[in-house]
Image (cartoon, rainbow, N blue to C red):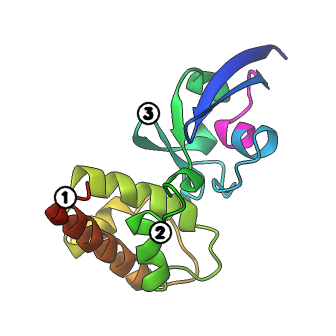
Amino acid sequence: MAAHDITLTVNGTEHELTVQSRELLVHALRDQLEYTGPNVGCESTTCGACTVHIDGKAAKSCTVLAVQADEQEITTVEGLAEDGEFHPIQEGFQEEHGLQCGYCTPGMMMTATQLLAENPDPDEDEIREALEGNLCRCTGYQNIVNAVENAAEQMDGATARGDD
């Protein structure tokens, strides 16, 4: 199997690594770079636990080859916080008890942050539709929806205050 030298910028830090042709991005992130936020769930795009942002767009890293992500900007859930301060989506999940076991939570957060970037004031149906590619077997989803609504409110308040 062929090996490839690639460069990934993950959460603002550039990494050079060697990957196999068939190595999935989620495995490169977890096994080589030790970013444990993206979780390996189904490896078939069903669960969304591995969702990251690639150049600002949510993507399920279990269906992206690491070589396809060469020279890309990757953001994992670990990269959402800035200067030690939680991102509003992280605060929302904490305040609204939007998690139980936590396995799906990183993927939910990454999907939700893209939703809020594209639609800063989603209604409940829009939130549920955006998250339908992310499975949770613990929560029943209502608290996750509440968490996204909470984050939208926090982000709207920050924009109104000029904190953007």
- Identify which amino acid the numbered label 1 is placed on: Gly
Q: At which x and y percent is residue 7?
A: 65, 22
Q: CA distance from mark 3 to mark 1?
A: 25 Å
Q: Residue at position x 29%, y 75% from top?
A: 149
Quadrant of the rendering where the N terminus is positioned? top right
Name the residue furthest left.
160
Q: CA distance from mark 3 to mark 2?
A: 20 Å
Question: Which SS class for mark 1?
Answer: loop
Q: Residue at position x 40%, y 63% from top?
A: 132
> In the visual, does 87 lie left or right of 130?
right
The residue beneath circle 2 is 90
Q: Can you tell which quarter of the image residue 74 is in?
A: top right
Q: At which x and y percent is residue 65?
A: 64, 30
Contact flag, marks 3 and 1 (Cβ < 8 Å):
no
Contact flag, marks 2 and 1 (Cβ < 8 Å):
no
Q: Which mark is residue 162?
A: 1
Q: Residue at position x 52%, y 26% from top?
A: 72
Q: Which residues are magenta?
A: 20-28
